[in-house]
């Protein structure tokens, strides 16, 4: 049995591929490398370079590699970008997902794990947020992910396909072994941007809104370490293979940190202040997002191992320093050549 991982050379995808390989799974990665990196994968694994919307390619991979499960990460993930380019997000996240699901059904794939998001909830009436909270996304990004959840629900009802939709809260950090991390230039993840600013790789970090109805005026998020999230995918695969029914699960720790608290954690990690610019609120941003994570712990027997903001920031900082060292070495080699 082999697992097809779409978007497996990306940030969360590559961590999950490492976790699957550590667990002894046979893995095939499909990635167009628009934001992913072949070097992020376990050696000597190489991705199949292609698009998840290419049904002919996907069908051939399912048949030739005896695929029994798909873990689907491929897609666009930036909320402000989705506000500017909604049709692009519906094409990349929704239309391509529909093609992938159809190819999986036709190919006899029985297990499907989907990378969804807490953005499907919008601004909930109460927190923490459980899986039964009404879904009212504030952005095309959130809607594009919710549409895929709905397609999976209906496909599972009509066909022999069972799925787990994992609704991520805020993912951060890097592999503690430094095998992979968030390497995408211009990434918008808060901790990534703050670490870059603290190391002088950005002029500053911009914080959008300091007048929200929260204790310190900034938005609050439930941050989950990317390695814990990767292990949740491995647990979801085991759950489906053991006969588990289709389910939607929150992926978070059940505690929230404000933007200011995150910036303080980065300051502690680097040992100095760094430039922070506060500006107006940004349309589409959610005020408070904290998970109720009881269901995933119970159903998947998943226990977080890295539930600590300072550890998350520390791993993100270590990865950023690694990227800086690699960049310096590459520049030196170019000059010497």
Image (cartoon, grey):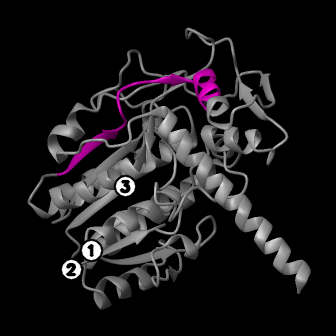
Q: Which mark is residue 161?
A: none
Which residue position is annotated with label 2? 1
The picture places residue 318, in percent across and down from the top left corner, at 60, 51
Q: Quadrant of residue 139?
A: top right
Residue 48's spot in the image, x, y percent? 49, 83
**Disc 2 residue crowd, few under 14, some 14–19, many 20+, Cα 10 Å:** few
Percent position (x, y) of residue 209? 70, 20
Q: Position of residue 161 (x, y in %)?
A: 20, 64
Location of residue 151 by image quarter: bottom left
**Which numbered disc flags the more N-terminal residue, 2 or 1?**
2
Going from the N terminus, do you reach mark 1 or mark 3 first?
A: 1
Q: Nearer the viewer, residue 160 or 127?
A: 127
Is residue 313 found left or right of 177 in the rendered image? right
Total count of labels: 3
Which portion, as a residue range, is magenta? 246-265
- Please determine whether, in this image, residue 119 is positioned above or below residue 238: above
What quarter of the picture does the C terminus occupy? bottom right
Quick check: marks 1 and 3 in contact, CB under 8 Å? no
Residue 79 colored in magenta in the image? no
Depth check, mark 2 against mark 1: the one in front is 1
Residue 252 colored magenta? yes
Q: Secondary structure at mark 2?
A: loop
Secondary structure found at label 3 = helix
Q: Is residue 145 above or below residue 4?
A: above
Residue holding disc 3: 230
Q: Quadrant of residue 39?
A: bottom right
Q: In the rendered image, which residue does mark 1 sit on?
A: 25
Disc 3 crowd, CA 10 A, few/some/many (<14, 14-19, 20+) = many
């Amino acid at each position: 049995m082999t697992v097809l991982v779409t978007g497996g050379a990306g940030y969360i995808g590559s961590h999950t591929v490492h976790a699957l390989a550590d667990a002894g799974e046979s893995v095939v990665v499909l990635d167009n490398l628009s934001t992913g990196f072949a070097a992020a994968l376990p050696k000597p694994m190489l991705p199949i370079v292609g698009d998840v919307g290419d049904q002919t390619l996907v069908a051939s991979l399912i048949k030739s590699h005896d695929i029994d499960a798909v873990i689907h990460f491929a897609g666009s993930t930036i909320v402000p970008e989705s506000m500017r380019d909604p049709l692009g997000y519906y094409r990349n996240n929704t239309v391509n997902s529909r093609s992938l699901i159809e190819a999986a059904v036709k190919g006899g794939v029985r297990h499907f794990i989907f990378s969804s998001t807490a953005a499907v909830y919008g601004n909930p009436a109460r927190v923490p947020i459980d899986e039964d909270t009404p879904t009212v996304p504030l952005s095309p990004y959130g809607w594009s992910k919710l549409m895929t959840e709905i397609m999976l629900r209906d496909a599972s009802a009509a066909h022999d396909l069972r799925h787990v939709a994992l609704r991520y809260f805020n993912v951060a950090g890097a592999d503690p072994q430094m095998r992979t991390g968030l390497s995408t230039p211009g990434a918008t993840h808060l901790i990534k941007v703050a670490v870059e600013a603290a190391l002088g790789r950005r002029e500053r970090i911009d914080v959008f809104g300091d007048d929200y109805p929260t204790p310190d005026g900034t938005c609050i998020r439930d941050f989950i370490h990317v390695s814990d999230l990767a292990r949740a995918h491995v647990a979801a695969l085991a759950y489906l293979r053991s006969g588990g029914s289709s389910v939607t699960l929150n992926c978070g720790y059940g505690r929230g940190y404000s933007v200011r608290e995150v910036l303080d954690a980065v300051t502690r990690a680097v040992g100095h202040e760094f430039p922070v610019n506060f500006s107006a609120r940004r349309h589409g941003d959610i005020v408070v997002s904290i998970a109720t994570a009881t269901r995933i712990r119970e159903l998947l027997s998943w226990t977080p191992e890295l539930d600590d903001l300072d550890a998350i920031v520390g791993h993100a900082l270590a990865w950023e320093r690694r990227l800086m060292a690699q960049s310096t070495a590459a520049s030196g080699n170019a000059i010497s050549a």
